[in-house]
Image (cartoon, rainbow, N blue to C red):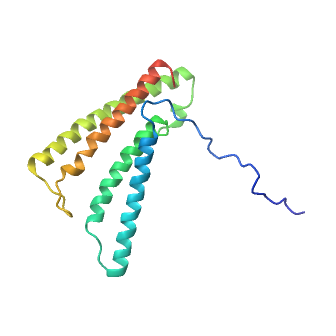
């Protein structure tokens, strides 16, 4: 017996249902677009380096330095949206199991811990950027001042802290 033929117009349910973004003052699309642009830049830089290496047996020295910087920025922008969308790494049996009151308490505790971590990261990375500026450290491949790179870590750590503060406020109000 032959199996029925699949048609293109057959409706297929998505594996993961789309969950709407929580209400935030600054749209999450900002971080989404930063992530898309950074990932595209990384792909172009890497592709150009592979092409040059294949054709000339040499590579651009600056690509690794720029790629590492872009990967750090990508991690921070994508991490920001992951926290707000509740898609960060966690042990789901604890975080999503049990009564709603317990889940809410665990969400508040985790939000406070993450908020404190990113505040500490902002302070310490700002000190590191200030040290780079004060001592005039330069990058090894391009020779630009290191603070051009390290300045962005406290900026993004503050942005994530603000996102977490908003998330914590919504949790304490019972909106999530």
Query: Could you tell me residue 5's position as x and y percent?
Result: 82, 60
In the image, 23: left or right of 152?
right
Image quadrant where residue 123 sits = top left
Image quadrant where residue 26 sits = top left
In the image, 170: left or right of 50?
right
Query: Could you tell me residue 45's position as x and y percent?
Result: 36, 64
Residue beneath the point at 53% across and 36% down: 92
Position of residue 117 relative to residue 137, above or below, is above
> Looking at this rendering, what residue extends furthest in the left direction?
135
> Looking at this rendering, what residue extends furthest in the right direction?
1
Q: Quick one: 128 or 134, which is closer to the camera?
A: 134
In the image, 1: left or right of 16?
right
Q: Quadrant of the N terminus?
A: bottom right
Position of residue 140 relative to residue 121, above or below, is below
Query: Could you tell me residue 116's position as x and y percent?
Result: 32, 30
> Looking at this rendering, what residue extends furthest in the top direction?
173
Position of residue 53 relative to residue 2, above or below, is below
Query: Could you tell me residue 143's position as x and y percent?
Result: 17, 61
Residue beneath the point at 10% across and 52% down: 136
Image quadrant where residue 115 sits = top left
């Amino acid at each position: 017996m032959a199996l029925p033929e699949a048609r293109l117009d057959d409706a297929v349910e998505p594996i993961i249902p789309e969950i709407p973004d929580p209400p935030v003052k600054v749209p999450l699309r900002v971080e989404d677009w930063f992530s898309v642009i950074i990932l595209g830049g990384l792909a172009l830089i890497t592709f150009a380096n592979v092409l040059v290496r294949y054709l000339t047996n040499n590579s651009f020295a600056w690509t690794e330095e720029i790629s590492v910087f872009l990967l750090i920025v990508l991690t921070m922008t994508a991490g920001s949206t992951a926290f707000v969308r509740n898609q960060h790494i966690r042990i789901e049996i604890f975080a999503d199991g049990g009564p709603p009151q317990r889940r809410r308490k665990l969400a508040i505790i985790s939000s406070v811990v993450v908020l404190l971590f990113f505040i500490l990261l902002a302070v310490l990375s700002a000190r590191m950027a200030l040290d780079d500026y004060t001592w005039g450290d330069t990058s090894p491949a391009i020779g630009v001042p290191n603070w051009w790179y390290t300045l962005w870590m406290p900026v993004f750590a503050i942005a994530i802290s603000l996102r977490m503060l908003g998330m914590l406020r919504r949790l304490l109000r019972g909106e999530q």
